[in-house]
Amino acid sequence: MKKIFVFIAASLVLWSCSKSSKESTDYVTYEDAEAEFAATLSASDTTEVLSAGNALMDSLRAGNIDYALSQLRSADTAGNVTEMSDELRERIRARLERFPVVEWEIDYYDFSLPGLNDLKYRTYMRARDGKSGVPAMSLMLNPVKKDGKWYLCVKDAELPAKDAANAINPKQIIGER
């Protein structure tokens, strides 16, 4: 939980440093930080993230795993975007080779903070023919906005997600103004 708090606090600090500072002793809840970040977003942000994610999924469906992996990044707890480690790249490659993407659909997306967002896809390992029981898996990404640009990062299982058991309580205080 400490790692998650550090990530959220670092994301908030990175984001709030770009705004004009004003003296205040108000506390910032996660809900407040989300609302402030949402106010900075436009329809083009959504379009950019979904276009990049959908292109990634189409690449996987076409069997272009190397290209898809080249589009993914990692983000550290301070919201810094880096290349994926070789170990993570090979772990993801092995998963994608073992469980190929035959079909995909967006499960949901949500923007929270510059360094903490959700873009979740449901992938199918064989064509859905209207019958139930088609094996499916989820692929969760963390779109990160850094210096005005969006990056598709792999979502670390320790990072909170809106639909996960570790979702953040929106009333949780995560910093001071």
Image (cartoon, rainbow, N blue to C red):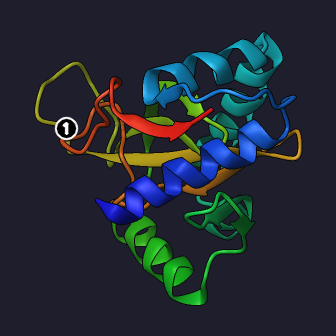
Give the side of residue 144 with respect to residue 34, left or right. right
Which secondary structure, mark 1? loop
Q: Is residue 95 above or below residue 152?
A: below
Task: Depth check: give the residue in front, 40 or 118.
Answer: 40
Q: Give 165 or 32, whichever is nearer the viewer.
A: 32
Please state if 126 lies on the left or on the right of 134 as rendered. right
Q: Residue furthest bottom?
A: 86
Q: Residue at x 34, y 36 (%)?
A: 127
Task: Indicate whether 27 appears above or below 8.
Answer: above
Q: Is residue 75 above or below residue 59?
A: below
Q: Is residue 160 left or right of residue 136?
A: right
Q: Position of residue 67 (x, y in %)?
A: 73, 63
Residue 149 appears at what percent x and percent y? Answer: 85, 42
How many numbered marks have been drawn onto this rendered protein structure?
A: 1
Q: Position of residue 109 (x, y in %)?
A: 50, 26
Amino acid type assigned to the residue bearing label 1 in the image = Val
Q: Measuring 45% from the left and 21% from the top, which residue is drawn there?
A: 31
Quadrant holding the N terminus? bottom left
| Quarter holding residue 122 | top left
Dividing the picture into quadrants, the one containing residue 4 is bottom left
Answer yes or no: is residue 159 visible.
Answer: yes
Q: Where's the C terminus, which quadrant? A: top right
The residue depicted at 28 percent of the width and 30 percent of the height is 169
Judge whether residue 41 can be spotted in this image: no
Percent coordinates x, y for residue 58 in the rendering: 63, 42
Q: Nearer the viewer, residue 18 or 55?
A: 18
User: In the drawing, does residue 38 fall left or right of residue 99?
Assistant: right
Residue 104, above or below 41:
below
Q: Which residue is mark 1?
A: 134
Label 1 Cα neighbours within 10 Å, binned few <14 / some 14-19 / many ≥20 = few
